[in-house]
Image (cartoon, rainbow, N blue to C red):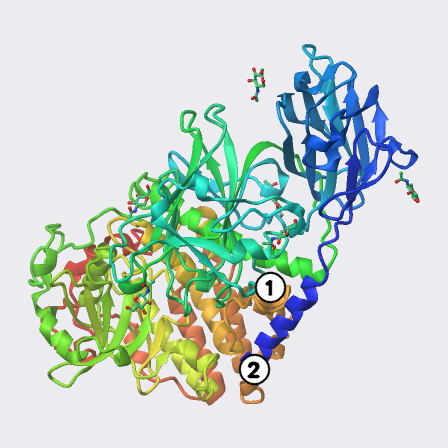
Amino acid sequence: MDAKFLKFFILISSIFFSSFAFTPQDNYLINCGSSTSTVVVDKRDFLGDSSNNASDYLSKGKSISLANPNPVSVSSVLYTTARLFTSASSYTFKIKNTGTHLVRLHFSPFVSNNYDLKNGDFTVMANGFSILSRFVANFTVVKEFFMMVEKVELEIMFTPSSDSNFAYVNAIEVFSVPQDFFVDAGGVALISPDGIQEFRQNISTLILETVHRINVGGSKLTPFNDSLWRTWIPDEDFLVLKSAAKVARTFDPPNYQPGGATRENAPDNVYMTAQQMNVANGSLNFLFNITWDFPVSREGDDTMHFVRLHFCDIVSVALNTLYFNIYINGIIAYKDVDLSALAFHELASPYYIDFVVKNTKDSGFERISIGPSDLSNTLRKNAILNGVEIMKVLDSVPLKRRPKKNSVWILVGSVLCGFFALSLAILTSLAILKCCKRKSKPKTKRPDSGGWTFLRVYGSSSRDTGSDGNALASPGPYGYYDLKIPFTDIKLATKDFDKNLIVGSGGFGMVYKGVLKDNILVAVKRGMPGSRQGLPEFHTEITVLSKIRHHHLVSLVGYCEEQSEMILVYEYMEKGTLRNHLYGSDLPPLSWNQRLEICIGAARGLHYLHTGSAQGIIHRDIKSTNILLDETYVAKVADFGLSKSGPCLNETHVSTGVKGSFGYLDPEYYRRQQLTDKSDVYSFGVVLFEVLCARPAIDPLLTRDQVNLAEWAMEWQKKGMIEQIVDPQLVGSIKPNSLKKFGETAEKCLADYGVDRPTMGDVLWNLEHAYQLQTNERPRERDDTGAPGVVTGVNLSRIGVDSVEGISDISTSRVFSQLITNEGR
Ligand SMILES: *[C@@H]1O[C@H](CO)[C@@H](O)[C@H](O)[C@H]1NC(C)=O
Ligand SMILES: *[C@@H]1O[C@H](CO)[C@@H](O)[C@H](O)[C@H]1NC(C)=O
Ligand SMILES: *[C@@H]1O[C@H](CO)[C@@H](O)[C@H](O)[C@H]1NC(C)=O
Ligand SMILES: *[C@@H]1O[C@H](CO)[C@@H](O)[C@H](O)[C@H]1NC(C)=O
Ligand SMILES: *[C@@H]1O[C@H](CO)[C@@H](O)[C@H](O)[C@H]1NC(C)=O
Ligand SMILES: *[C@@H]1O[C@H](CO)[C@@H](O)[C@H](O)[C@H]1NC(C)=O
């Protein structure tokens, strides 16, 4: 679809949807103690519970109606009456739509009939769960709760304490919220003083009490302005340092995307304002956070809060320029937030991120900070926040059965929300992985064989091929003399980092095309100048790549670590990423033979990585953008070490890994946090289907069953109808046997359990077979799959990549530390 038309379509559909405000299926609005129905400011009609119509709801107990003797003083017409209970009494509401409901109780004390409502002291239960206990209100208080209602009715019971002998309420609202309001798929991060973990319960089962609802950077929003009739208040009073923040505002309505946040998550006005970093014009001082302290009750160590942060990038002029970090109570809760990627590659597209936060007894507030990420361009660092909701976790409803989703678009929405929830889960798992890997895992054959070892990455000196490879002395930057390139040469090669030479950008920084002195075409990857973030990954990449050379691995030409620069120089890959040749560009489609050759090449590179050194290296980030093509379409695997490993898997790694790999990630890897080379095999299987179907691993714009390529393709493959989803460009050109072999190979790669997946060697063999079935020929260069060589970087000519293949050096085997599986297979 043409982009302009798509925009137009989105505009039309947003107008279409905005004209249909949310209508809850269950919607009970009770004006307690009143005999008439009352229309309030937000135009809703509250039924008097003394009228015949509403008295049905009052199911048991003793109560009387009270009228405020001073009705002009109250803030809402609802507060001119109240119902007072002298014994345990309840309202019962019939529930048509089981699922999450919002319960809002209004208390506005007055004196009437010798009762001073300020003295009311009571407990409120909802379907047996205590939501208010020993509750007293000295002034008008509105209490709001979210809870799953699984039964056909909801009973709200008021029980006076023996001290006061009465309970009361002025108004009750009970209504259903959209099914995808809380999304369970995947998981949510649990932030506690000990760090970040996965929160193991489903959010939808929690009973939540609203504590704060903030329109950051904006004004107060009343129920009139909100489709769930909520009140949002400004954030200024919670800012720790007001001068750190500057209001950002737009007058354009938000660009809602399917799968992102909806108007029911927060109204337009929340997404149209934000606080951003207040950086003086021209100043480059970005070394600060914006911090808010939100008071919360101190009730022991186990108090938990659900925190939902709302975002909408209304500050950037272009995509992929805003990256920031979120801290909760001083703990990094989400690093390198990339709204462009999260919010479906659209600016001003609303999105929210959920957390569960466990408090310490003594803090008394929830501290939320946002600050710039090292990923962002130095000249444009920023951080934003549009809205905050903090809800106290009261209890959880044991689920009896799953509520039925009753319309397709809700399903799609929830699945897509689940998509980011799942990303969070992965992030969390990776964080857990970080914590766990220090401990030796039980039930492994060898003490250090949990998939990880803890040797420093910069192992043996690369200068001396023959010397003791086990030496762990860190060579520092001096260990790789021969690959060092002076900064001045790199400046020259890239015309002083000319913007016009930028060929890409990644988590690490910009990539420039350059020409070295000896006319060698290179790709220059430059870390953010001055930032030492990613230093371990930088060294890993140098260590790994300077010692491993293979025709199907992108080779390192050199590096520079001068003047606080971290620069890696690679051979230039003329044709760019495999993905670009599959979809999303104007490049001519690749033929089936070409695709097979590329897959075979990449499989060779990976096979070599897994088996080439004594212990093997796991790539961990196989995807179609990490398979590059040279001018003759020879495939080379790229980007190892940098975004994956290092002596300590720090958070940079975690979040970039998560972003980059979603849709390719081995389900077993995040289930069991055990990384094996079979995780690469899984990812490679996804790439195979990507090659066959010419579509992304995750495409949120497709219908639910198609969003995830691995699932969708597997369905067709299992039905034996894989030909139905082949890239239309290929239809008719693939021989059935070749397709069958290819489909089976991909299917095996995607087996749920690593043990059931083939090795890369098997995959390679099968792909070669598929090639033979297509062409009746053996594929090219079949001889380099046997005993691959590992060489040290020292004596390499900077271009003679192929010439050094096959030279073996066992001394490097210890160098790869974390990248290594100890099992050696
Ligand atoms: C009771 O319901 C009837 C119709 O269902 C409506 O006409 C009437 O106004 C209602 N009474 C009150 C007090 O809301
Ligand atoms: C309400 O007022 C009573 C007496 O004036 C006081 O003891 C109590 O702490 C107040 N409660 C709140 C919640 O302010
Ligand atoms: C959470 O919900 C999912 C469905 O969304 C369900 O499969 C899972 O069993 C639930 N987990 C718990 C702990 O209730
Ligand atoms: C919110 O609603 C009030 C009416 O209650 C209206 O006057 C005001 O303009 C609205 N504010 C915004 C920001 O839409
Ligand atoms: C900031 O500087 C830019 C260019 O230097 C200028 O165009 C802009 O008006 C300045 N903004 C403010 C608020 O001073
Ligand atoms: C932002 O806050 C976090 C958590 O308190 C802290 O670790 C980090 O150093 C702060 N960043 C800056 C730039 O002050």
Q: Is residue 51 left or right of residue 284?
A: right
Label 2 Cα neighbours within 10 Å, binned few <14 / some 14-19 / many ≥20? few
Asked if 474 appears above or below 698 in the picture, the reply is: above
* Residue drawn at x 69%, y 18% as measured from the top left: 120
* Residue 642 picture location, percent across and down: 27, 61
- The reply, left or right, for residue 814 in relation to residue 199 is left
Q: Quadrant of residue 380?
A: bottom left
Residue beneath disc 2: 2
Q: Residues within 10 Å of mark 1 (few under 14, many from 20)?
A: many
Q: Which residue is mark 1?
A: 258
- Residue at the image point whose x is 29% and y is 61% from the top: 281
Residue at the image position 63 percent from the left and 46 percent from the top: 222
Where's residue 359, x and y in %?
A: 44, 31
Circles 1 and 2, Cβ within 8 Å, touching? The answer is: no
Residue at 50 percent across and 71 percent down: it is 696
Does label 1 or label 2 sit earlier along the sequence?
2
Counting from the top left corner in percent of width and height, residue 334 is at 40, 49
Residue at mark 2: C-beta within 8 A of ligand 4: no
Q: Please, what is the three-letter code of the amino acid marked with disc 2? A: Asp
Could you say which is closer to the camera, residue 505 or residue 541?
A: 505
Q: Quadrant of residue 238?
A: top left
Q: Residue flagged by tag 1: what amino acid is it?
A: Pro
Q: Label 1: state its secondary structure.
A: loop
> From the viewer's perspective, is residue 672 above or below residue 764?
above
Looking at the picture, how far across and down is residue 656, in whole percent? Answer: 37, 58
Of 510 and 819, nearer the camera is 510
Mark 1 to mark 2 CA distance (whole Å): 18 Å
